Image (cartoon, grey):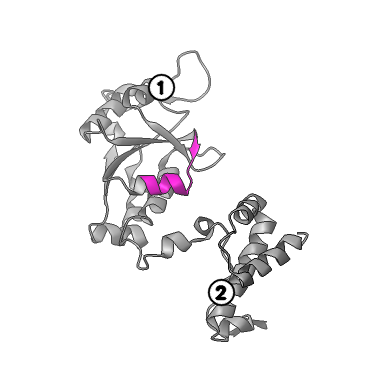
Amino acid sequence: MKIDILTLFPGMFEPVVSSSILGRAVDRDKMEIRLTDIRDFSNDKHNRADDYPFGGGGGMVMMADPVFGALESVNAQGKKIIYMSPRGKIIDREKIEELAGLDEMVILCGHYEGIDQRIIDHWNMEEISIGDYVLTGGELPAMVLIDAVARFIPDVLGNENSAADESIYSGLLEYPQYTKPREYRGMDVPEVLVSGNHKLIALWRLKQSLILTKERRPDLFDEFVKKSGKLSKEERKILEEIVEIDV
């Protein structure tokens, strides 16, 4: 997958795209991430890419011309173009999987008070948000999006089932995890996890996930209950117990 990132601050991305899972994906040619500095396409002698908004108001707005130039430089016409924006639809698994299936996409990182609307209109951009809050720019949201998408690209993760099994994607929050040592400062690992009984371990994990999800994300819990028709007899018994718990 090829991803072009258009930003005023390309240096923010370099440590991220060269480290951990993203770095390995790039090294193994599973992903190609290219950074384009929007300021390089400014016609202003000071390389400015922003100006005051028409109609007044606080803050600055990214101008059309430098962004158009950056988009044209990566041959964005006809490609999927994402604009990271707090007014966009919040990403979910369905959107992430859709994007992971693309061969190429372009991500525009806004800054200041936003970008000239004509950029969005002309390039038919899709606005995407990572949550109901505002950050100083689109760089951090773009990193979140790229990392989430990468996990669904074949062979990026070591375990083919890892992405599907992750916390939210399974429909429940993740159960508690433990590692060595077995006892630490008077705190023990739950006995079932060292029992070697994989069925009991799976049921324990399900129960913990159900408890956490009902307590912290009742919306996800209710949705899981609606779609619980394929649970085994033992799993359904655990679910029924949790449903009765008042959290």
Q: From where the camera sits, is residue 209 visible?
A: yes
Which mark, residue 202?
2
Q: Where is residue 206 in the image (x, y as percent from the top left)?
A: 60, 68
Q: Where is residue 7 in the image (x, y as percent from the top left)?
A: 34, 38
Is residue 90 covered in magenta?
Answer: yes
Amino acid carrying label 1: it is Gln
Q: From where the camera sits, is residue 185 visible?
A: no
Q: Position of residue 117 (x, y in %)?
A: 41, 22
Quadrant in which the C terminus appears: bottom right
Q: Label 2's element? A: helix
At horizontal 66% and vertical 55% (from top left) the residue drawn is 216
- The answer to whether residue 243 is above or below residue 203 is above
Which mark, residue 117?
1
Mark 2 or mark 1: which comes first in sequence?
1
**Would you call the spot at circle 2 few (<14 residues within 10 Å), some (14-19), or many (20 or more)?**
few
Amino acid carrying label 2: it is Ala
Q: Is residue 56 left or right of residue 145?
A: right
- The answer to whether residue 229 is above or below residue 107 is below
Highlighted range, magenta: 88-98
- The answer to whether residue 107 is above or below residue 122 is below
